[in-house]
Image (cartoon, rainbow, N blue to C red):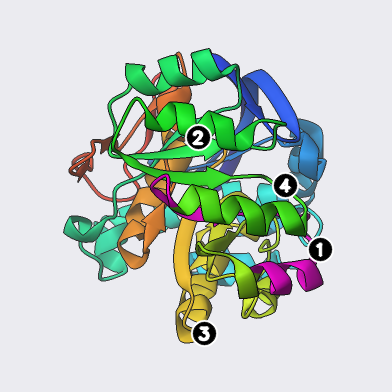
Amino acid sequence: MKVYFQSLILPLKYRFTIAHQSREEQETLIVTLKEDGIYGLGESSTNPFYGITLENMQQPLELFRPVIQGGNWSSPTELWELGKEMFQSNPFAQCALDQAAWDLFTKKRGQKLYEYLGLSPRHIPTTNFTIGIDTVERMCAKLREVDWPIYKIKLGTTQDIEIVRELRKNTNSIFRVDANCAWTVDQAISYSEELATLGVEFIEQPLEKDNLDGMSEVFTYSKLPLIADESCISEEDVQKCKGRFHGVNIKLVKAGGITPALRMIQNAKSLGMKTMVGCMTESSVGISAIAHIAPLLDYVDMDGAMLLSKDPAKGVRIFPEEVLFPEGPGIGAELII
């Protein structure tokens, strides 16, 4: 067993802005596991909001190299548990390793990941397409450029309702809005009333991630369902979201990979909450991993590679009506650089 790390720069089609950051390109780390001529790929992008850099992702991976290459693990779940303490402060790094382990594991079994999990690709919800914060005119232009049945609108400006009103003039598609922690309790409750009349399906993360008391109040009075993102990072956070959110958006990179995400999805379902998996700005490596577990979900946000001007990988192909998986076993992603 050998492990390799490769850093890449992902160029975006447009400058991407949300409430707490803005960027024109995205650094990402690719992890490759190789054994007996078979390889597995995994990915995790950097994130300044969470203090994640290429350097601090590679450091614990290098320290964990002897365990990985020692081969004293028989499944991705076992490897994840072996690394739980090592990666406790950097789940992003563990995510890339976990995805690569699942890719290799299922390739060696001759199965696609969704087949191993007993899932059907016919039951994948349509992903949303994200419109980042910009001038109203440019946001409308981006929406018109990509005809899609569901849009996620990034908000957190001084004119959030006006933005949604203008965008609504351009399409009858479903809207989802994501404030990325930018609103107050009063704003969230007030905005929910207007947004409900504008064809918005749900509101994602309206308040600061630790404002759980505030979320209880918004939960009581909101006219729209509420989905946790920044408030739901680890497995322990799912229970905290009960009674404060109607559902959880689980990011593989923040959770530590596919292994914990599967447990978080089942936990949320057992609590009667909706489930969603979201992406960061990622290549088709990370997006393909998400697609394989998407049949478990109520909602999915896996448009990250669609926002790139150049994708260094190929994998699943996403259309409004279906997701097409590559031939062959594993996750199905392949680097093309």
Q: Amino acid at mark 4?
A: Leu
Q: Which residues are magenta?
A: 197-218
Q: Quadrant of residue 167?
A: top left
Cα–Cα gap, marks 2 and 1 = 26 Å
Q: Quadrant of residue 86?
A: bottom right
- Whether residue 207 sits left or right of residue 137 in the image: it is right
Can residue 52 be spotted in the picture?
Answer: no
Crowdedness near tag 1: few (<14), some (14–19) or many (≥20) residues, C-alpha within 10 Å: few
Q: Which residue is mark 1?
A: 210
Q: Amino acid at mark 1?
A: Asp
Asked if the residue under mark 2 is in contact with the one under mark 4, i.e. CB atoms within 8 Å, the reply is: no
- Residue 5, position as x, y percentages in the image: 63, 34
- Residue 255, position as x, y percentages in the image: 63, 60
Q: Residue 164: which numbered mark, if any? A: 2
Cα–Cα gap, marks 1 and 3 = 20 Å
Cα–Cα gap, marks 4 and 2 = 43 Å
- Residue 145, position as x, y percentages in the image: 34, 16
Q: Does the stretch in magenta take in 45?
A: no
Say which element carries label 4.
helix
Q: Which residue is mark 3?
A: 271
Can residue 273 be spotted in the picture?
Answer: yes
Height in image: 240 above or below 152? below
Q: Which residue is mark 4?
A: 61
Height in image: 227 above or below 33? below
Q: Earlier in the sequence, mark 2 or mark 1?
A: 2
Cα–Cα gap, marks 3 and 4 = 34 Å
Q: Name the residue located 36 percent from the left edge and 37 percent from the top edge.
A: 333
